[in-house]
Image: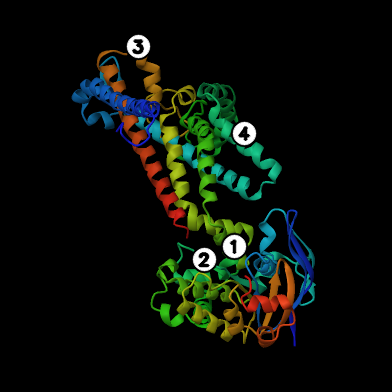
Amino acid sequence: MATRSGRNPKDLAFEKASAFFAFVVLFLAALLFAVLLRESLPALRKFGARFLVSGTWDPVADQFGALPFIYGTLVSSFLAILIAVPLSVGAAIFIDEFAPPWLKKPVSFLAELLAAIPSVIYGLWGIFILVPVLRDYLMKPVTKYLGWIPLFKGPAYGPSVLAAGVLLSIMIVPFILSVSREVLATVPQRQKEAVLSLGGTRWEMLRIVIGQHCIPGIFGATVLGLGRALGETMAVTMVIGNRPEIFLSVFQQGYSMAAVIANEFNEAGGIQLSSLILIGLLLFLVTFVVNLAAKWILSKMVAHASRGI
Amino acid sequence: MEIVFDIRDLSSWFGDHQILKKIRMQIAKNSVTSVMGPSGCGKSTFIRCLNRMHDMTPGFRTEGEILLDGVNVYSERIDPVYLRRRVGMVFQQPNPFPRMSVFENVAVGLRLNGRNMSKADIAEVVERSLTMAALWNEVKDHLSQPGMSLSGGQQQRLCIARALAVAPEVLLMDEPCSALDPMSTAKIEELIEDLSEKYTIAVVTHNMQQAARISDNVAFFLMGELIEMDKSGKIFTNPSDKRTEQYITGRFG
């Protein structure tokens, strides 16, 4: 390699060093997976597949199942997506198509700044503002009039799967927003002009070109946001209620995979520790797959756009 | 002869950059008017003023008037959405909607602005438009296939059918053949001639032979100015302006 014409030895050293660092990152990821797997083996051996479907979390009897945590994680993340996707896509459309130039920069800057706020701050805000507001102005009236619907059954304590979902939705907006804006930017100008030239309004233009060009990309952005929501720990721990049970009502307390690890890790030992690590392994695998899927969808989308329809 | 567009001293700017300089010309009903000139002469900018396609471009402005049946298209009374229903457009690159079938591509304009047409009526308009665009016989058995599965020339005729479906009075074509092979070009040119019986057509082209073949009237643009406009036969045999003569004899452009 050193014989490559005109290679400066310093360049070569730099190349090797950067390759080494890149390798270290890969190695750390593999090591992380290996350690998670090794440490979770006792729980995996003892509970097997039952771990995924059992709702018992009983440190006294040493019986552990992850279902309430999986349920809480999935439901709160799903709620977050449900709220964040329309919000982000709407904001992306507004910023790129309707906002006057002086408003574009501040809005997109502030929205992206949301991603920089530490999640414990979100959690505090959730405890002191979001949870009381949701409880008094949303949950109480809804349980009063629509409490017969299992999804909205009371009583409304405040900390709940719904609170976690709403908080998560605010936290993932910046990610979905920025990807959605990139996706909107891939729409060829001549496609927009095609709609306008037929006598379409601006709204019709957006509806058609988004339907024609942006659905896979927005789906990719959604999956990316889902990846963030699934793994979020601190803020969720602070508002979800931390109760390892499964309720159909989103107004009830729940628990999430990340939250139980954060709460119990310090005092756990033996099979309980192994069970927590197994939950960690599951979370690792799920977020890994979800993020991989998002990247794959988005890269396909970009390839599609660069073919230039 | 009835005049559809009466353009009076039209100037236009992108920011500080002046593109069109006091264009005065008329476009006659049921005729084919070619706007010809070298690249960068402002011919595309000009034709896109006629249906206010520049409205979305920041920093674009015009002076002067474009009278369509006596009303300035840039006046406040004109809603660009309805203007574009009357003045349709076909673009340089065929631009069918990638996820729509052949049928949907033609029907898309009929579903805009909350128009409520019955399925049978839509099907009828689609067939009529495809027939007018000389595409019906080629696609009638593949209406549910994606519009993108057609060849380039067929895609351009599909776009013409799409424009015709909303029943415009005027059809603007911005270099409609420049992305097409000679066979497809010949088909589109033939189509333009047929369509001029019912529609007023303005075509932008940098191709003189094409302008000579298809047009009744030719306007020659140079550096944002209209150098001269005349009957096609006159322009190509006995132009009044020296610059026109230089252009058609291939001295520049």
Instruction: Write the residue at 38% across / 78% down.
Output: B141
What residue appears at the point 65 percent right and 39 percent down from the top-left corner? A105
Image quarter hosting the N terminus of chain A: top left
Q: Secondary structure at mark 3?
A: helix
Dot 3 or dot 1, earlier in sequence = 1
Query: Label 2 to label 3, Cα distance in Å?
Result: 64 Å
The kind of residue tagged 1 is Glu
Mark 3: few/some/many CA within 10 Å (<14, 14-19, 20+): few
A257 and A179: which is toward the camera: A179
Q: Nearer the viewer, residue B59 or B228?
A: B228
- Give me the chain letter of mark 3: A
**Three-letter residue code for mark 3:** Glu
Residue B213's spot in the image, x, y percent? 58, 84
- Residue A110 marker: 4
Say which amino acid is labelled 4: Leu
Q: Nearer the viewer, mark 2 or mark 3?
A: 2
Neighbor class of circle 1 (other Cα within 10 Å; few <14, some 14-19, many 20+) is: many
Q: Amino acid at mark 2?
A: Asn
> In front: B70, or B143?
B70
Residue denoted by label 2: B95
Residue ID for mark 3: A267
